[in-house]
Image (cartoon, grey):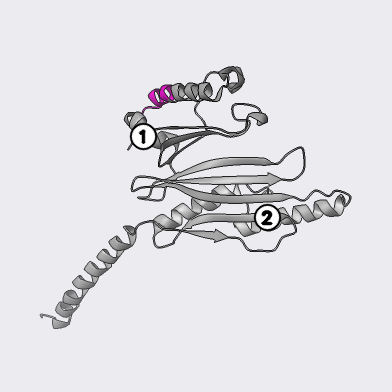
Amino acid sequence: MFNKSNLSLKKISLPIIILIFISSCEEETKPLEFEIVSIENTYEADIEVTFDKAKVNSEIAKNINSHIDSAILKNVPFSREEEATSIEEALKDFDEQYKSFKNNFGESAQTWSLAIETEILYKTENIVTMGLSVYSDTGGAHGNDSIQFLNFNPENGALLTQNDIISDMKGFKKLAESFFLDHMKNEGLDIKEFFFGKPFQLPENIGFNEEGIILLYNNYEIASYAQGYTEFVISIEKAKEFLSF
């Protein structure tokens, strides 16, 4: 026997399925937008944390934020063996460590410091590059500071590796070495002072900005602390044949 109710259900279900599919596609294709987040808690240590987060309107944004949180957490000294579950927990632990230090060494005037901030350096449909800057000082001759580039795939929120970005590593390395030597010459520096007697190596941090591809060596990576950061840029035009996109 023919069931009219089943026919009506089919007529209604098809438009609903289409609407759900369209809505899902629209959600995933929304452009990435970032907002600045600041941790406003009160600490006894000198703590300042301000960073960019993707506005959560898709799984892509959630993936990117997960990578940002993870990168920040790796740079906050944590006293326990297990990892902190949030940035706030890690900062509270850092502050507790400082208060314990003060209680045990009251005569010391040293105030612990931790400063974390990010900056969106480059954003296109192919890649998003974020710079993460971290400075910490828990005593000693000087504090520790570093810069890390986070490269994201805006299509899925994945954190890209150098192998994801560079298709011809050998060719790119040769190009980078020529730019590095030009940089040394322009700065009046001797390459013998770098790489601790080893051959030229690419830096751990390669990212993008409006000028091109940034190559950045952190303190101690290729030279003494006194040399500071070493940074130079290769234009996209010069490097495009070695890139994956």
Q: In this view, does 128 lie to the left or right of 220?
A: left
Give the magenta-colored segment's residue range: 167-175
Residue occupying the far bottom of the picture: 4
Which residue is at 64% across, 55% downward? 48
Q: Visible in this render: residue 85?
A: no
Q: Does the magenta stretch include residue 127?
A: no
Which residue is at 44% across, 61% downward? 55
Main SS, magenta region, reads helix
196 versus 119 height, above or below: above
Q: Visible in this render: residue 194?
A: yes
Q: Is mark 1 on a helix, strand or loop?
A: helix
Q: Residue 236 carries which label?
A: 1
Q: In this view, does 102 lie to the left or right of 198?
A: right
Along the polypeptide, which appears first: circle 1 or circle 2? Answer: 2
Q: Residue 47 carries which label?
A: 2
| Quadrant of the snapshot with the N terminus | bottom left
The three-letter code of the residue at mark 1 reads: Ile
Q: Is mark 2 on a helix, strand or loop?
A: strand
| Quadrant of the snapshot with the C terminus | top left
185 versus 237 height, above or below: above
In front: label 1 or label 2: 1
Which residue is at 33% across, 32% downward? 237
Q: Which mark is residue 199?
A: none
Q: Indicate the position of residue 87 as horizontal and vertical percent values.
A: 60, 56
Q: Indicate the position of residue 64 as horizontal and vertical percent values.
A: 45, 52
Front residue of 170 and 211: 211
